[in-house]
Amino acid sequence: MAEFDIVPSEDIAAGRATDAYFDRTMEALQHAGKNPTVVTEVTLDQFPTGEWNVFAGVEDAAQLLAGYDVDADALREGQLFDGGPVMRIEGRYQEFCRLETALLGFLSHPTGVATRALETRRAAPDSLVLSFGTRHVHPSIGAMIERSALVGGLDGISNVAAGEVIGREAGGTMPHALVICFGRGNQEQAWRAFDEAVGEDVPRVALCDTYDDEVEETLRAVEAVEDLDSVRIDTTSSRRGDFRHILREIRWKLDARGHEDIGIFASGGIGPESIRELRDVAAGFGIGSYVSNADPEDFALDIVEVEGELAAKRGKLDGKKEVYRTPDGAHHVGLADRDGPKDGDPLLEPLIRDGEIVREFDIDAAAERAAEDAETVGFGR
């Protein structure tokens, strides 16, 4: 069996996927006989900024902490936040010291991906939007990318193995390679072979920009495949020209020939800006690198109390905190032992108690939460 450069799951769970200085920290603490009870918090920004992100990666973070003698509270998956703690961990510091590196990774990257996905979703609220981007990232994180894309509100995924991990069926139709295998001028053979070979549950979508003009290939595909659902236009940017004009022309030619029921699906370098420009002529979009290549968010984990006493490094807010959402959509941060804002709902909820996971995880519920919260805070307006 091939060996890939992938850190094994068991090493992550055991705390070996750690920065070396945490090993040195453990050596020093054990030598000194110190193992204080601490409160730590994961934050991106200390105060609310108005720049919203979608919290994701919570299930993996919970699995990492499970079995360790700690308590943890966190925002719900899909919750939007713009400052303050997203997670709080309490326990003896040596119990979870070595987990910090993996914990931050489990939260930082998925949150970046889910936030990009929500931006895309909000740009096309009534369109079919699919995640096509795992080819741009290391295959070991494909499931994280696809799950985070769904949390952000995308409608479907393309990675088969990732779908098996997260319990979702991957979808897809044909690449240019299929058409090229049949040769120039034989596009109809490729489209018909696809139609005859794949299951009835697979949408009949013809890729119509491999060799010839997009409009010409579209009209040929309509004649070649009975009950065609849609055409996909994936023209490379170097040959695209005015992409909106191309799609409008295809729509016109289809409608003029009585094919109003055949949709247009656009892909290739698509992001929120292009979606807004094209959503009146395209019924759906395939989103790749804009979502999958999202930068991880710069989360940090900091000690804020030691043995019940306020403690934090410079630039960080000490003390155990709570975050609240008020009816006007604002996000508030305050000390946990003080009264919160009037009508404010506390957002940090139990995740781990005595090393046991006390929360269930559901992708659809997280996506619904993100959509509702986006309306509340005005995300993407």
Image (cartoon, rainbow, N blue to C red):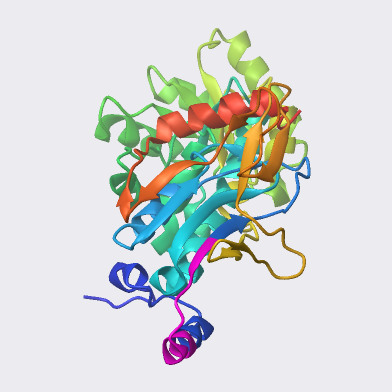
Q: Position of residue 331 (x, y in %)?
A: 70, 36
Along the line of sight, which residue is nearer the eye, 34 or 251?
A: 34
Farthest residue in the left direction? 1
Residue at 38 percent across and 26 percent down: it is 203
In percent of width and height, residue 127 lies at 57, 23
Q: Position of residue 135 (x, y in %)?
A: 48, 56
| Furthest residue in direction bottom, as rendered | 31
Q: Is residue 55 magenta?
A: no
Q: Is residue 35 magenta?
A: yes
Q: Which residues are magenta?
A: 27-39
Left or right? Give the position of 288 relative to 241.
Answer: left
Question: Which image quarter holds the C terminus?
Answer: top right
Residue 19 on image: x %, y %: 51, 80
Residue 122 makes an appearance in the image: yes
Examine the rendered structure and indicate whether residue 162 appears above or below residue 32. Answer: above
How many numbered circles are shown? Answer: 0
Q: Is residue 205 left or right of residue 122?
A: left
Residue 178 vs residue 311, the one in the foreground: 311
Q: On screen, 225 above or below 30? A: above
**Image quadrant where residue 264 sits:** top right
Residue at image x 48%, y 57%? 89
Image quarter of the N terminus: bottom left
Q: Is residue 246 visible?
A: no
Q: Does 72 appear above or below 158? A: below
Q: Nearer the viewer, residue 250 or 213?
A: 250
